[in-house]
Image (tube, rainbow, N blue to C red):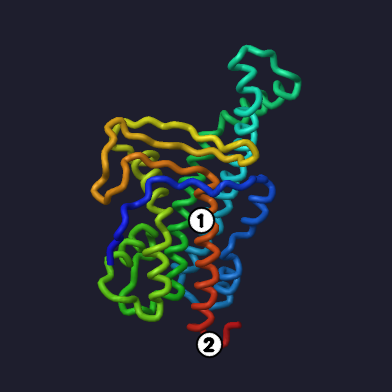
Amino acid sequence: MTRAAPAPSFLFPPKRRINVRREIRKRSPSPIQPFINRLALTPTTDAVGAAAARFHADYSLYLLALERTLRLAAVETAYRHGPHYSRKYHVKFTASEAKLARRRALLARFGDLDFYSVIMFSRALLDDVAGLSASFLMRERTTPSFRSFARQKRFFLELSTGYGRHEGYAAYIRSRTDWFDVLKRVRDDFVVHPQASFLRFGLVGDKGRSDVGALFVPRKSTVRPDGSLSEVGLTTVGLSDAIDTFLEWFGEYALTSIGESTPGVV
């Protein structure tokens, strides 16, 4: 089975107001924690247990990086709609603007580190999720990768038939994880393994809708073989919203699947 439409090139969030504390609170604990709690009571393999431990560690670091990035986003957005114009037109800062400018300078020192950490740990925790899927997919006649989310997705895309009782899982991975393709391209082509010279443009949210991100543009812009643009971009909120939605779905699917395959577990 193959994708009919070109791969997406941008991962931006719907417009909504962002409150940093609320954003972090709603993600802690992780959406798959009920599944992991059930998994602890279920006979399973060492590999699945190790994947659960890795997910806990990677998700904790992802949340820390996300919180720091969202705090910078709130300050950066406020700065761009206030002190930025005072500086641009050579107007003396007010006391509140000077305080905001100092806070921005402090947080911005770690801005790239935190933004790239969100990207790296997002990718890591998705590989952990691939490992956790072994808890209900390992008994199938053919199995995908349990070490790499990218290879697992490729396995389901290349299947020429349905995937039995777990076709629902396969169909979701095939058709509702286009956001992962954006994350993969940013991480692989512009952060870890850049193959060519490129420009990076910072992205800042609208007033009241704090967000930061980046647009990556190769100096030689082309259309890729899959029909997508060579430019690619994402924002912190756009990425974290997509991961949230996926983890909520995965947690519910996995919880139901191990309950069905393990008699006596309630």
Alpha carbons under labels 1 and 2: distance apart: 31 Å
Image location of residue 226, percent across then percent down: 27, 51
Q: Of the two numbered discs 1 and 2 on the same chain, state the one appearing first in sequence.
A: 1
The answer to which image quadrant residue 169 occupies is bottom left
Dot 1 crowding, Cα within 10 Å, few <14, some 14–19, many 20+: many
What is the quadrant of the C terminus in the image? Answer: bottom right
Q: Name which residue lies at 34% across and 76% down.
A: 163
Q: Nearer the viewer, residue 40 or 8?
A: 8
Query: Type of residue at label 1?
Result: Ile
Residue, far bottom: 263
Evaluate if marks 1 and 2 touch, with contact meaning CB atoms under 8 Å apart: no
Image location of residue 246, percent across then percent down: 50, 61
Give the answer, above or below, for where 61 lies relative to 163: above
- Name the secondary structure under disc 2: loop
Image location of residue 156, percent across then percent down: 33, 67
Q: Name which residue lies at 31% across and 53% down.
A: 6
Give the answer, above or below, for where 4 lies relative to 34: above
Q: Nearer the viewer, residue 40 or 222?
A: 222
- 87 sits left or right of 146 in the view: right
Give the answer, above or below, for where 33 lies relative to 226: below
Disc 2 marks which residue?
Answer: 263
What is the quadrant of the N terminus in the image? Answer: bottom left
Give the answer, above or below, for where 183 lies relative to 75: below
Disc 1 marks which residue?
Answer: 243
